[in-house]
Amino acid sequence: MAKYDLPGIIDFIVNKTGQEKLYFIGHSLGTTIGFVAFSTMPELAQRIKMNFALGPVISFKYPTSVFTNLFLLPKSIIKLVFGTKGVLLEDKNARMSFITFCNQKLLQPLCSEFMSLWAGFNKKNMNMSRLDVYMAHAPTGSSIQNMLHIKQVPSLSQRVNSLLVSMTVKGLNPPSQHACL
């Protein structure tokens, strides 16, 4: 997505609007895609007037949710459990049921527990009066292929960091300007 999709989208917008520099607003995966694209393709970064990087961005270093831990499973297990199409794809009826269910004050602790499965376990930072709003927007679905792409990030990051350390030890100049994985 960072290598092909985002540059293609930016080219399309520039061609349609004539604007040479664009504002980029990324949220969650969009933020990650922006960071990867702009750090590895400086010519693309030059076309961005301002990058609004909104969170959250996935971190695998200290996983606190069941969702993040799913990425630690082998590819074959992910496909076996979730199939090959998608997971948590949009279902408006289910979404409305969640909202109605979580609007009940008595049931909010249960909703909070459910939400912590994908958002992590830090309930002291959860605003319970906004729980229905959270449930209206999350969890969001993803394609299995997208999950498998995200799963590659930790191993890619380790390989890049190992390469940079190796280059430094050997006295070579690592590409410091854009190495930010």
Image: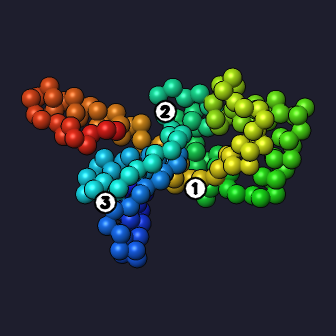
- Residue 168 in the figure: left or right of residue 49: left
Is 171 situated above or below 90? above
Q: Earlier in the sequence, mark 3 or mark 1?
A: 3
Number of callouts: 3
Q: Is residue 49 visible?
A: yes
**Residue furthest left as drawn:** 171
In contact (CB < 8 Å): disc 2 and disc 1: no
How many angstroms separate mark 3 from mark 1 (CA)? 29 Å
Secondary structure beneath disc 2? loop
**Quadrant in the picture for the C terminus:** top left
How many angstroms separate mark 2 from mark 1 (CA)? 19 Å
Q: Which residue is mark 1?
A: 143
Is 139 or 83 nearer to us in this picture?
139
Q: Which residue is mark 3?
A: 47
Snapshot quadrant of residue 107 = top right
Q: Earlier in the sequence, mark 2 or mark 3?
A: 3
- Name the mark nearer the viewer: 3 or 1: 3
Residue lying at 19% horizontally and 30% vertically, measured from the top left: 166
Snapshot quadrant of residue 133 = top right
**Residue furthest top as drawn:** 124
Secondary structure beneath disc 1? strand
Q: Residue 81: x, y in percent?
A: 64, 46
Q: Which residue is mark 2?
A: 60
Is 67 or 109 nearer to us in this picture?
109
Q: Is residue 148 visible?
A: no
The residue under label 3 is which amino acid type?
A: Arg
Q: Residue 151: x, y in percent?
A: 48, 42
The residue under label 1 is which amino acid type?
A: Ser
Residue lying at 84% horizontally and 50% vertically, measured from the top left: 97
